[in-house]
Amino acid sequence: MPNIIDPVEIKLLHENFKNGTWELPNYATSGSAAFDLLAAIDESLKIDPLETLFIPSGLSIWINNPDFVLVMAPRSGKGCKEGKVLANTIGVIDSDYQGPLIMCIYNRTRNIVNINPGEYLAQALIIPKYHMKYQIVTEFSNSTERGHNGFGSTK
């Protein structure tokens, strides 16, 4: 059984959630890490090539636990097959944010793409959050095999 944080409060902002036309956020299987976010719009929208639109999810989600964060990620099928991705690649929603979840959808294709009402565009997962303690140093306390070697240095 998956770990569950409780309570996460969800406010329904679009009438189609309230009247049962659209499914409430859920996990498709017991192994699913994320739940889908849909386009809470009333009519289809067109996104020109290389254009970005802000698309409401129709939800506000308050995690209300400072040890967790909600992360919005693209749906692989939408990005790979249709070119609809999150413009910021990933969205971080802090545990104390209570506003609407908005998806920043980018059309990375050379064609006009449509966004339809209720279309699943992104996914969200809740993960543990950590704050770091740090100290400023002039040299690291240990060397690693990789050291300062960058891109492509590990084959």
Image (cartoon, helix red, strand yellow):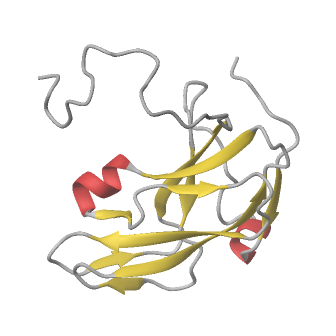
- The residue at the point 41 percent across, 15 percent down is 142
Left or right: 71 in relation to 130: left
Up the image or down, 102 lies above or below 134; here it is below
Left or right: 128 in relation to 62: left
Q: How many marks?
A: 0
Q: Quadrant of residue 102?
A: bottom right
- The residue at the point 30 percent across, 82 percent down is 51
Up the image or down, 144 lies above or below 122; here it is above
Percent from the top left, x then y, of residue 90? 46, 55
Of residues 19 and 105, the one nearer the viewer is 105
Percent from the top left, x then y, of residue 126? 65, 41
On the rendered image, what quadrant is the C terminus found in?
Answer: top left
- The residue at the point 32 percent across, 15 percent down is 144
Q: Is residue 149 visible?
A: yes
Percent from the top left, x then y, of residue 151? 18, 37
Residue found farthest to the front: 138
Of residues 88 and 124, the one nearer the viewer is 88
Of residues 80 and 22, the one nearer the viewer is 80
Q: Is residue 19 visible?
A: no
Percent from the top left, x then y, of residue 53? 43, 81
Q: Quadrant of residue 83?
A: bottom left
Left or right: 107 in relation to 122: left
- The residue at the point 57 percent across, 30 percent down is 29
Up the image or down, 126 lies above or below 79; here it is above
On the rendered image, what quadrant is the N terminus found in?
Answer: top right
